[in-house]
Image (cartoon, coloured by chain):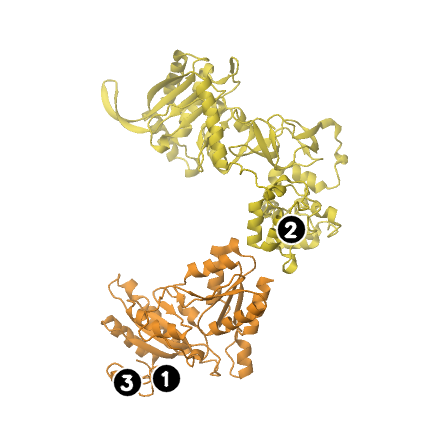
Amino acid sequence: MGEDVGRYGGAFGVSLGLLDEFGPDRVRDTPLSESAFVGAGIGAAIAGMRPIVEIMTVNFSLLALDQILNNAATLLHMSGGQVAVPLVIRMTTGAGRQLAAQHSHSLEGWYAHIPGIRVLAPATVADARHMLAPALADPDPVVIFEHGSLYNASGSPEPDGAPADLDSAAVRRSGTAVSLITYGGSLGKVLEAAERLAADGIDAEVVDLRTLRPLDDDTVIGSVRRTHRAVVADEGWRTGGISAEIAARIAEQAFYDLDAPVERVCAAEVPVPYAHQLEEAALPQVAGILAAVRRAVG
Amino acid sequence: MPSLGADMTEGTLLEWLVRPGDRVDRGDIVAVVDTAKAAIEVECFETGTVEELLVQPGTVVPVGAPLAVIAAAAAEPEAGAPAGTPHARAGAHPAEHQAGPIATPLVRRLAEAGGVDLAAVHGTGPGGRITKADVQAAPHAPAGDGPSEGPAVPSPPQAESHGHPPTGPGTHPAEADGAGGRVRASPMARRIAAEAGLDLARVHGSGANGTVRAADVRAVLRAPAAPVPSTASAQEPAAPAPSPPTRAEAMRQAVGALMDRSKREIPHYYLSTTVDLAEATRWLRDRNRQLPVAERLVPAALMLKAAAVAAREVPQLNGWWTDGFTPAPAVHLGVAVALRGGGLIAPAIRDAADLPLPELMARLRDLVARARSGRLRSAETSDPSITVTSLGDQGVEAVFGVIYPPQVALVGLGKVVERPWAANGMLGVRPVVTATLSADHRASDGATGARFLSALDRLLQQPEEL
């Protein structure tokens, strides 16, 4: 359920055709009230259903943050384990499409702060396809962040492929000189940077976090222990963001393996601008990732 | 190199706390020496002026080898002190030097910027704290005054944060980087260098701002016969010698050698008695009730005091056997302390029989803490005259110990337990402890040992007299 998920097929076309296939009992358009329809989703989950709630963008999800944090993430704890909330919330995140500041932010790091929910950030078509089933199977709330710029990505995931592993990060490219740690909409830029670095003889490893909560420390720290350098790239703001959490964990767990300070490539600390050039300038780009890697590798 | 225990044959000089030109008084702590058991602060046994340090830090020398030359006191006029007066002051009071002057970060920053040595500034703030005004009023040293003088203005907080093995400031005049600060190096480079025993100051940093990186350290380690002068450790990595024993292994060997000698040479005899502690326990409880927690006494302190007084009453057990018995002039009560990493050490509470109980309690607490942190003084480890071992906190009721040569007796104390006890024809439940004595039959006979245990029992029935 969600705004325009039925007849319109979803603001980004994600649920196109589902109404015809599954009917109005299972595919529901809701009023424009994030708090109300997320709350309804929580109620349905408590009552034994497995609802998927779509919120149009992460910016709008703030209207439902009370429901997500104070109810969905908390009820299992407050009921002494009696009331589980097997809810899946999907929402769009990220910038790059000239939708301006109220539709473009990357606040998944805020959600990753909350104990009691699982936070997913698929970066590939296969993950977007195969994370949904295990997310529904999870007895606790799962929030899935889909980067808006990835909706046009194409690929051919196996129709009956195995459910994705929701606990592990993935090494998308193996390397020895530096670990590039990223997720979601930044993965493509990071992989492109890695290819360019390879041309210069710098062999970068690319880690796709996939799950922002709980973070897969083993994969991240294991990679840094091999490469001794780390660059974190994400579209969130730098201050207090998920990149800060990752840098802190590296400092805590791999300090004596570090041969250079951890570098971060994040969004400029401004509301994401509307003008194309300004928006591009505010977001992490390949050039910025290359510069950070060169500082780290020296 | 002083003998810091009967089992010590050699020691490693870890650190000098004085430098040539410093005045030292008998009893000052002048160096730190590593035995197989612990790092021990060595007290000076002469008064005078340090003329020359003969042994470099990190060197192993046998017991008896000269470490430094000290000139007699009279020959040294005050005006003749060498140029770096702040040095001499800092060196003569190593404890103060280590603690550093009391100053806020702001004051330290101002001092650093102005080239002021905080150690030489008199603090006028509360508790001797150095204030901003003190720094501004202090004479400013010319900053960055030539590399050879660089380390002559030690900056205590920086010296403390130095990552590599402690060496006195100025022992590496060539590589100090003018600012006297620490080498800029990545954590990984630091780790690799530490593992290989390489001084980072000798590595050229290729990173930004001269940062030493892992590759720089590896390059130096790979280079055959690299131009690394003087220190033995830096030359080793090329051909790693059979690795030296760890502290735990060395400790095991040292304890083993000493105990082996004890059982080989000393004909032990053993006595045991059970002491009623009802009176002592009651007295302690009443006394502690009136005291703040920090000043309360534990039963162990009372029993140590009783053992010390009993040893004074039975001098045949208090002393050393070397080609005959030498009685000790006072009771220096060794206290066996189990170390957390394994092994044990038995430093002495000096003049224990003459100490008031609160003082003995404080000494005991201090001694155990320092033994476990590996910072004992030479006088504490070299001359215990009788040792007490207590395994009560481990739950055992009696311990028949092995004597520490060349001592002639070892007192064992077990756990204080409640037992049915008959006294004056009445049966009651009382706290009791099993006290044992292991003694050297060459120096005394069973009757002497019996007098000791009986004295111990008697003393513990009159705790107020202790």
Q: Which residue is mark 2?
A: B203
Does the residue at mark 1 contact the one at mark 2 (Cβ under 8 Å)?
no
Quarter of the image containing the N terminus of chain B? top right
Q: Which residue is mark 1?
A: A13
Looking at the picture, tell me which residue is in the foreground, B332 or A6. Answer: A6
Which residue lies at the image location 54% right of the left edge and 37% below the top edge? B242
Q: Is residue B346 visible?
A: no
The x and y percentages for residue B239 are 59, 41
The yellow-coloured chain is labelled B
> Separation of disc 1 and disc 2 at Cα?
60 Å
**Mark 3 residue type:** Leu
**Mark 1 residue type:** Gly
> Separation of disc 2 and disc 3 at Cα?
69 Å
Q: Establish if A193 lies above or below B175.
A: below
The x and y percentages for residue A209 are 43, 66
Of pointers 1 and 3, the one earlier in the residue sequence? 1
Residue density around tag 3, few if under 14, some if 14–19, many if 20 or more, within 10 Å: some
Residue density around tag 2, few if under 14, some if 14–19, many if 20 or more, within 10 Å: many
Does the residue at mark 2 contact the one at mark 3 (Cβ under 8 Å)?
no
Looking at the picture, tell me which residue is in the foreground, A158 or B141. Answer: A158
Disc marking residue A19 = 3
The residue marked by circle 2 belongs to what chain? B
Looking at the picture, tell me which residue is in the foreground, A169 or B14. Answer: A169
The residue marked by circle 1 belongs to what chain? A
Label 1 element class: loop
Hey, which quadrant is residue B72 in on the image?
top right
Rendered shade, chain A: orange
The x and y percentages for residue A5 are 32, 83
The residue marked by circle 3 belongs to what chain? A
Label 2 element class: loop
